[in-house]
Image (cartoon, rainbow, N blue to C red):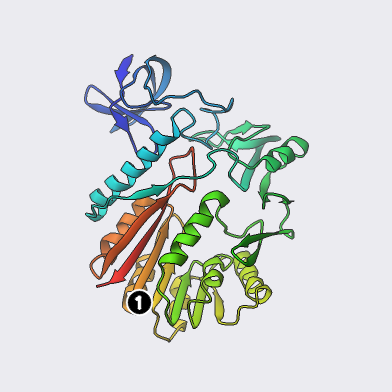
Amino acid sequence: MLVKIEKLNHQGLGITKINGKVTFVENALPGEIIDIKIIREKKKYNIAKNINIIEKSPNRIEPICKYYNKCGGCDFLHIKYEEELRFKKEKLKNILDKYANINYDIEIVPSDKIYNYRNKITLHETNGVVGLLKKQSNEIVEIEHCKLVEENINIKLKREKKPGIIRTNGNEIIMKEKEYLNIQIDKYIFRININSFFQINPYTYYKMFNYIKNNISKNQTLLDLYCGVGVFSIILSDKYDKIYGIEINKDSYKNAIFNIKNNNINNVKFFLGSVENNLKKIMERIDTIIIDPPRSGLSKSSLKQILDIRPREIIYISCDPLTLARDLKIIKDNYEIKDLKAFDMFPRTNHVECVCLLKLR
């Protein structure tokens, strides 16, 4: 069946219509004529397989990975990087406009590397087969090499393939819970281990940290929510008299405690547990709140407590535009957007990181 691709959805799938019914096509680009086969029919939409491309888009390139279209690690190996950035920019603009009524011309900061940038990979095992998950499946694709991870991880994959997490700081590798890595940002050293939260793209997260540091106001009290191993608390410690961080992950919390001691930071205190339960423990006036929540965004309780605190400024970091838009729709009643910038933390995938700077009205 020949179809013409109209546009891409937010996950990067091609969209066409068959008898008025939306059909999503893998490995497709706008304007292409493709021979497809419908592989799944739902009540409101179809899923189709790309059988053959009759007319190619000028934005199409040849994927460099032999596992592409099998494993679920990448979305955009078939598209020029400039077009990927344009897609992400438009995706953010459309989501914020549709779900938060925010019309903003968003700048997107590219990654210096679009391959071999990831400092972490998670391998799965089923019936003795170790690898990555297939797209929309629990089946395993056995791999020997991943185009997105740093090369020393690939060297490790060839020598020793086991299920679990592999992390690197560019030099050393860890695969066990009791091992840890040291990562330097500015003049500070951060210890992380297997289960600690830490950004996976060092080529972009340095840019994001510097952007936040250069655009945050110098003030008295900072609240760092979902603080991970304490990166923002520590790199901003010279801008505030007091800083409080809250982290629910025990490994990240332990590393955060170690990191303030190791970096001789005396004005930072961390709390272990949920944001909802720990916000009420902090009684001082809060000037600035940094929010870096999981993909699910803020809970209703957390969002209400943050708005009740009424900080002078909020820095909201998000890896999911949909939950960012949902939360900003509420926040913007009391806060104006000073700046909204995207950082391509996840090249060759449909994901993108956003930083929104908000000021109390």
Report the front residue among 196 and 40.
Answer: 196
Give the residue at x 30% y 70%.
Answer: 359
Secondary element at tag 1 = loop
Check the image and report above or below for 19 versus 358.
Answer: above
* Outermost residue, bottom side: 283
Q: Residue furthest right?
A: 159
* Image spot of residue 69 (x, y percent): 51, 27
Left or right placement of residue 33 versus residue 270 in this view = left
Residue 344 position in % (x across, y down) = 45, 47
Q: Residue at x 52, y 26 (%)?
A: 63
Kindly identify the residue that appears in the image at 61 percent across and 41 percent down. Answer: 149
Q: Which residue bears the numbered disc 1?
A: 311
- Pinpoint residue 73: horizontal percent, then vertical percent: 53, 37
Amino acid type shown at disc 1 = Pro
Q: Where 211 sits versus 123, above or below?
A: below
| Residue at image point 57% right, 28% down | 65
- Does 99 sit left or right of 348 as displayed? left
Q: Is residue 213 visible?
A: yes
Q: Is residue 65 left or right of residue 1?
A: right
Q: Position of residue 252 (x, y in %)?
A: 60, 65
